[in-house]
Image (spheres, coloured by chain):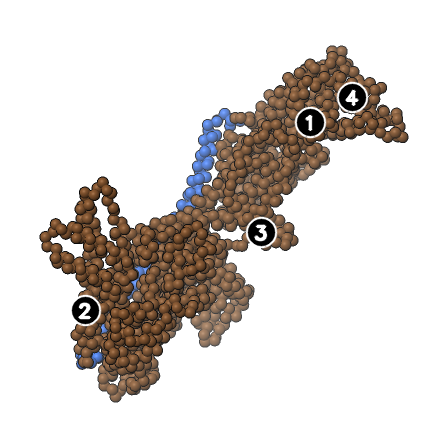
Amino acid sequence: MSSDDKQVPQNIMMILTQHFQTLIPDDVEEITMQLFAFDAEDDVDLQEGSKIASILNSLKNNTQIVLGLTVSSVDEDRSISMMPEAATAATANANVNYLYVETHELFETICGLLEETQMTPVDVAKSLMTKNKSGRSRRVFEDGVEEIVNGVLNGRGKRQRAHDDQPEVQGPALWVSSERGATSSPIEYSDVHAYRLSLSEDTKALNQLNTLIQEGKEMVSVLYAYRSCVKALPQLPDSMKQSQADLYLETYQVLDLEMSRLREIQRWQASAASKLAADMQRFSRPERRINGPTVTHLWSMLKLLDVLVQLDHLKNAKASIPNDFSWYKRTFTQVSIQWQDTDSMREELDDLQIFLSTRWAILLNLHVEMFRVNNVEDILQVLIVYATECLELDFALLFPERHVLLRVLPVLVVLATSSEKDSESLNKRVKMNRLITIFKNDPVIPAFPDLHLSPAAILKELSMYFPKFSAQTRLLSLPAPHELPPRERHYLVINHIGAIRAEHDDFTIRFASAMNQLALLKTIESADIEWSKEVKGCMYDMVVEGFQLLSRWSCRIWEQCAWKFSRPCKDFVESVEMTSSVSDYEKVVRFNYSGDERKALVELVSYIKSIGSMMQRCDALVADALWETVHAEVQDFVQNTLAAMLRTTFRKKKDLCRILSDMRTLSADWMANTTKPESEMPTSQHGGEENKGNFFFPRAVAPTAAQVHCLQFLIYEVVSGGNMRKPGGLFGNSSSDIPANDLKQLETFFYKLSFFLHILDYSVTVATLTDLGFLWFREFYLESSRVIQFPIDCSLPWMLVDHVLESQNGGLLESILMPFDIYNDSAQHALVVLKQRFLYDEIEAEVDNCFDIFVSRLCEAIFTHYKSWAASELLDPSFLFTLDNGEKFSVRPMRFTALLNMKRVNLLGRTINLRSLIAERMNKLFRDNLEFLFDRFESQDLCAIVELEQLLEILKMTHEFLSRDLTIDSFSIMLSEMMENVSLVSYSSRLASQIWTEMQNDFLPNFILCNTTQRFVRSSKVPSAPVQKPSVPYAKPNFYCGTPELNSAHQSLGRLHSGFFGLPHMFSIVRLLGTRSLPWLIRALLDHISTKITTLEPMITGLQGALPKSIGLLPFDGGVTGCMKLVKELLKWQSKIELKTEILHGIKEVGSALYWMGMLDIVLREVDTTQFMQVASWLGLIPGTDGQILQSQEDGNSPVVTLFKSATAATVSSNRVNPTPFYTMSKQSEAADLLYKANLNTGSVLEYALAFTSAALDKYCTKWSAAPKTGFIDITTSKDFYRIFSGLQIEYLEDCMLVPPNNHEMLGDSVAWGGCTIIYLLGQQLHFELFDFSYQVLNIAEVDSAATGPSNKSPHLSQGWEVLLESMKKARRLNNHVFSMLKARCPLEDKQACAIKQSGAPLHRIKFENTVSAFETLPQKCS
Amino acid sequence: MARAGGITNAVNVGIAVQADWENREFISHISLKVRQLFDFLVQFEATTKSKLASLNEKLDTLERCLELLEVQVSTATANPNLFKT
């Protein structure tokens, strides 16, 4: 090879490398930036920067605390898969803390620089740590810092980071998806020939066996996924019997396809058996013809045997195959009648029938083949010894290999002991006890997803077919799994989960730290070689450890499954009462896992998946480190260890020497020493005389599979001396003359070699180890249960998801997406391994279904949680504190944040935006909830308004909490949507019109006022017109307050306000309707008053007509009794009793409405005052004398405007900040100033209402208060309103006394309010007070009592007037109260009132004409 | 018996092995870089997807807001006389 030739590839390499390296970080960043330039608020980086700064700050102050916090938080959320970020943070804290550096002048610099670039503190820490080993801590620390600072300044510390804010809470999901390709790694050993080890024949056989294994696996898949065709065949109805022959033909054609596959299997197994037997026979002759068998070869034999055994098991277990076959045969006989030559076909069919119906046909055939020509006991024994040894030393590195060994061993034993002589010789090689121990330790072996094997059962059953073997009574007396004492401790994951958790936490942290070190190493050019070797070695160790952990954990799941399948649940009765029959599958899966077991399984699955995805992600990052380490290991062994051995131990042994130097020849990489020119040249290529080992530079190349294979073979040769018949096994023999020390070295390297292949096959290994797809498959149970598919409740992955949702466990929640990755695995298995579309379709259907259910239930859970949180926040904390059972109202925190940030959930190759799905559903849920609340209010009376407000408040708070984590529509928009007042021109709303309807139909007629308590209560009398209301709609508790406890708490709060209508209700109305709909309601109410008065008018005219022509003052001489008699004579209304009641009701309604306005006035005043207090200081308002409001500043600018103006001026002058937002704010403040000032002086609603009523009454002035013709007060002939009312009042008072359910309860105090207001507004107050009948009666009674004197206290008692007089007094007091109130609010002298502008803002103290048209400015009720 | 360790032409094999190491270094280097490029593309896709998702989210919100505003404006323009001042 010329030097030019060597130069070229290196140059290309360099160019390409440089190109790639420059291509990746720079271009990409540019593209990304360009793409997302408009996405201005990319806050991820900012947050990260500030996070780093805060971490560093906290490091400065108290590292211990931070560390403690991190650790404790890790403890609490054990089951949450630990993010690499968190892990690195924890390590950073831990590591930096070792330095005991409290503060340093460079901290500031680091902080700043870290924010500029994107380095984590861990990188810093690691760099510092490695330099610190020599103990020159301070100096080194400074050096390190400076180095990093320089690196950062030169832009070398820059790393490509994921601009990805999605938390890692799902599995790797690389199956099914097309994202990664390389998942198969071919091993063909094509380069073995190059080494000229005369292994070519061995290799050929090896490749043949491997091809057979591949084919066999496909056969296994065909058999496993086989479903009965017969079940799907149609039956002909009687009317079509004539075409039976056609059906037979069709059936035959369909079945023929399936049967041809079975025929193929039959043929294949025959050829495989003969090939295997031939292969074995080559090694078992006394003189071997070829080199080997190599270890790889042994494995291939074992695997092929395993495939054959699996096929046999499947053939035995599948009952549908013989079924289909017999049907096939029947159709064949029907169809073949017309055919000419069917003998050969018939023969073939018979063959197939024998094959299918014979149990263990494959194994028996293999046995025959093996012992046909020559005995193969030798090789069988070698295999047994090898398998036993592997199992005992736990040499099988990955669990599938272990299972292969466990499955094959019983069969091997059976085959090897099929003659007396053989069993003895086997006994010599392997003690029976060893085998029995192995069988006992693993009573159940996983074989297929839903079928387990047990060595005991296999041995027992085979003993019938292999008569010689039945002599082995010790092996046959093994207990079957169901006879074993419970071994739950070993098999159930739940018993190991604690240790697993600890392993997981420990491993995650160390792996992340190793990754960080590696990443840091890559950022530093010309790193120390020793250090880089150490870092890479550490990474290698971590990867090996990770594989071992994953293998152990996945193995646990497999074995637990097998164990569960072997022990179906027996006591499922209490959990299932709805279904009469429980399928077998439900017994082994659905009812066989307790809650804790499901929890443990979820945890374990998420550990496997999270570590798997962590390792899968860093595939490309660690690849060269791994190659380099493997290379270094091999070279170290070959160049140093072997050299040493050659010099010392093996100097005398020419044979072995040869082998050792062959090893060196075929794998040594001498030139690695010379590629770096500045390094010291190796002094000698052949071992050298000096004692220290060769120094060689790392090269990131791994040995090929063939090299590993050859090395393994050669070591094996050295150790065993080519003699397989030695007792004691591979490395166990001490008879060899190789020193123990060397043997140990060889052995260690031998084991390492076998792991190298897995390491080099990184992504495939990870994928194999994290593949949990078997948890879904249940073909055997489907067949035995005779159903097409089980419901999803029986499906293990869904059971796990379901369990997480049910358990409401905050720790498990973030693992909820992990079980979905099982579906990905099983879909992949169905597509790639089983190659069955129907299985994939079934999985897909199940996933679709499950995911929908999952999303909807997750949303419910999220909504409930946030709702309860809000509801419990709104409860009074001090009250809760003093409460004994206050804890039950507190809400356990749940972290939905991670799930809410999932924008890419990988499911069966699809990418699902979970976040947007949730947001959509949340928007809908909030609207539904609002709808429900209004529905609920509509089914209740007006008093429920307080409860409505409370519930709306809770909902609003829920929205506030949720929108911190999720983008959903703003609450006000949703509210206005549901209130149906989106339109700009609609002043009413759903709520306002409901309130109005409620008032008109129920409140005004049926509620009575209590003047003293200022409350309206429902009249106890049955309402004249019962109000029709929809029934209260049903809703789940999360539409109220979340949990049932909180519901009851808030309900009892709400119940306090449910019995009456008072000021709290008024406050609620004001808050809920706001300034927009309130004027509409007021207008509606005023219109109602005016209508009422109009309807009253004719009735009053009627009563006026019934009055006698003249009514004088009541005479004093008759006393009270006489007076009453006279009054009764005067008022001859008895015939018009209905008219009277109606008038009273009318007056009561007017009174109620006016009083309601009064309450509204009070509330509005309070609200206005509060607002004024808040605004005044900003607007610069100060109270002046006499209730006036003065402007504090003379220049007309209020403080808020001045403040923003000066701020803007300052920013403009300083020129450092962008002044645009300040200009905006300044403008806004001016607007706010104007708006708030305009709204300051609001008028009184009550005054306005009184003015309105007065205007409405003006129409009837002539009728109700006729001007006296004489000009004097008309006493006797007046038929004015006051007279009517006083008549009504005295009769009403009398009735109150007489009727047991007294009238007062029916009408309440609002009659007085209504009557007196009308009287007052008509200007008849004085008349009324002078001439009212009851007042006159009271006067008479007073005179009477004064006359009779105090001696005779109660002159009226005997006459029975005491009660009446008392109620008259009460009425007088009430009337006086009303009159004084009216005088204060509506002085009649100048009918002052306020108007309301179009905008809804009342205009204060404006004089206007008393015409109704003046009120047209209010929004119309029905526009 | 064909004894193991039968490398007949050890020197030639050694040279070939050496050349093989060199070649494979080149190959593995290239393949690793391709894988890294591939990795990056996958990551880039993921990043892009989530960025687009958040953009979509914002657009959704804006769209709904806009819809509401449109309705409001349409009610206003349907009754122009109400807004005459």
Q: Does any portion of residue A200 appear in the rendered image?
A: no
Q: Which residue is mark 3?
A: A889
Q: Nearer the viewer, mark 3 or mark 2?
A: 2
Q: Residue at x 74, y 28 (%)?
A: A1297
Same-chain check, marks 4 and 1: yes
Q: Which residue is mark 4?
A: A1124
Q: Secondary structure at mark 3?
A: helix
Pick whichever of labels 3 and 2 is earlier in the sequence. 2
Q: Nearer the viewer, mark 4 or mark 3?
A: 4
Please tell me which residue lies in front, A613 or B9: A613
Q: Secondary structure at mark 2?
A: helix
Q: Is residue A46 above or below residue A1275?
A: below
Instruction: Check the residue under mark 1 and report the chain it is in.
Output: A
Q: Which residue is mark 2?
A: A274
Q: Residue at x 12, y 58 (%)?
A: A344
Looking at the rendered structure, the kind of residue marked 3 is Phe
Instruction: Check the residue under mark 4 and report the chain it is in.
Output: A
- The chain in brown: A
- The chain in blue: B
Please tell me which residue lies in front, A831 or A324: A324
Q: Residue at x 30, y 53 (%)?
A: A839
Q: Marks 4 and 2: CB-CB under 8 Å?
A: no
Q: Secondary structure at mark 1?
A: helix
Same-chain check, marks 4 and 3: yes
Give the CA separation, mark 4 to mark 1: 22 Å
> Label 4 crowding class (10 Å Cα cut-off): few <14, some 14-19, many 20+?
many
Give the CA separation, mark 4 to mark 3: 63 Å
Q: Is residue A897 left or right of residue A1024?
A: left
Q: Residue at x 48, y 75 (%)?
A: A136
Q: Secondary structure at mark 4?
A: helix
Q: Which residue is mark 1?
A: A1311
Give the CA separation, mark 1 to mark 2: 113 Å
